[in-house]
Amino acid sequence: MVKKLKTYRVGFEQDFAALLSARRSVEEDVADTVRTILKDVRSRGDAAVIDYTARFDRLRLTPESMRISAAEIKVARKGVTAETYEALKLAAQRIETFHKRHLPKNDSYTDEAGVTLGTRWRPVQAAGIYVPGGKAVYPSSVLMNAIPARAAGVERLVMAVPAPDGYLNPLVLVAAELAGITEIYRIGGAQAIGALAFGTETIPPVDVITGPGNAYVAAAKREVFGQVGIDMIAGPSEILVVADNRNDPRWIAMDLLSQAEHDEVAQSILITDDEAFAEATCMAVEDHLATLPRANIARKSWDNHGVVLLVRDLMKEAPTLVDRLAPEHLELAVDSARDMAEKISHAGSIFLGRYTPEAIGDYVAGPNHVLPTDRTARFASGLSALNFMKRNTMIECSAGSLARIGPAAMTLAREEGLEAHERSIGIRLKGTQEE
């Protein structure tokens, strides 16, 4: 049964604290297994990847057949309808436009001491995109992970996608082609993450790995962080909808279920100031569940993790509750959505107004759908081109500007007991004075 909390009832703070601390999923203890796989891949390369692929995906590979050929991608293209292909193209174009608009700019200036300072941004050389495979169909995940890398200027885009029993979904391959991915390997699991991070005889290593996966993939990404960069360790999906009684309860109910259908441990939360509207929305959820293909999953999510929060004043109370929850997806289905958004600091992505369902952001709006979960929106952001870039700082001193700021640096070096530091500045100042 969905949990209902009221801010104006005794005991709310205790109940809300329990909500914040609740763990929706039990982490599988796979760390030891993953470390063994990664060590083996690092040691034996292709041979280890091939062995684990045969064991877990029931697919016999050779070094030559690991990589998906251009001919296979061409065949996949024929298996996608024109309507779907055009939808993928529209999504790809909108995602690329959005991410290119937010590329960081280089900067350079000369300060009052005469020192020239600046920053410059450069893309990593290679990015690895992990995509779940088999019967799963996640072309949107391919676009959302690869296109920001392409927008950043990454030269080499690599995708790893498992092919259990040899099956590859054509949509995933077509999306990869649209996203500019030039290398695709039919491997998955921790062994794929190891191959991307360490490299093998066939697969050169990458610099950054992004993309969703199961517990083994998540654990592997955690283990290889430091060898490569990663996007994040994502938890179960979540949505928080702030809605007043001017909404159609059926719309809001479907928005709540749009995340509940992802996973039994996904979470959907409604904040409203009208108890009758809350009840109508819950009834609409029941009506929708009678017709949804993934009703079994959505039902478990809603019953076990769904929450309705009732407040007296939405504009005054909702922003504080939102910031404490720091949701992955936040819908503000109220009249003054922009005004409310200004009062909120912590959310992965914000959907403004009654005609902006979260699902539009999953596919074609433009911003990324790879977002921080488990309240990490307090300090983390969604995937962007920045995940595939690094910043260099630039410093240039003349003899005169070094003479102006160098003595202070020498003082600090001396206080830290680092004499070579002090002398490396002083030897230049002495040479300047002698001239």
Image: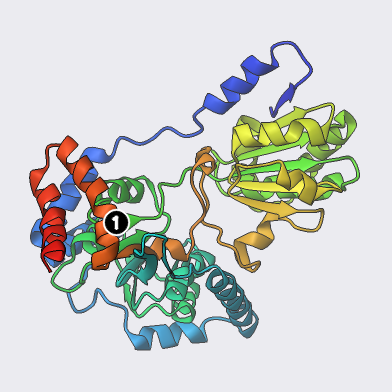
Crowd around label 1: few <14 · some 14–19 · many ≥20 (10 Å) = some
Q: Can you name the residue that lies furthest to the top here?
A: 10
Horizontal and vertical percent for residue 83?
65, 81
| Image-quadrant location for residue 192 | bottom left
Residue assigned mark 1:
404
Q: How is the image coloured?
A: rainbow
Looking at the image, which residue is at 65% across and 53% down? 293
Relative side of 42 to 181, left or right: left
Please indicate whether residue 331 sits to the left or right of residue 399 in the image: right
Quadrant for residue 206, please give it.
Answer: bottom left
Percent of width and height locating residue 99: 54, 69
Q: Inspect this view and state whether residue 290 appears.
A: no
For the point 72% across and 48% down, which residue is it? 331
Q: 258 left or right of 163?
A: right
Residue at horizontal 28 percent and vertical 39 percent from the top: 30
Tag 1 secondary structure: helix
- Point out the image quarter for the N terminus: top right
Residue 423 placement (x, y as % from top left): 10, 51
- For residue 92, what is the image quadrant? bottom right
Q: In the image, is 42 to the left or to the right of 95? A: left
Position of the C terminus by quadrant: bottom left
Q: Position of residue 52 (x, y in %)?
A: 21, 57
Instruction: Classify 318 as above or below 397.
Output: above
Q: Nearer the viewer, residue 413 or 209?
A: 413
Identify which amino acid the numbered label 1 is placed on.
Arg
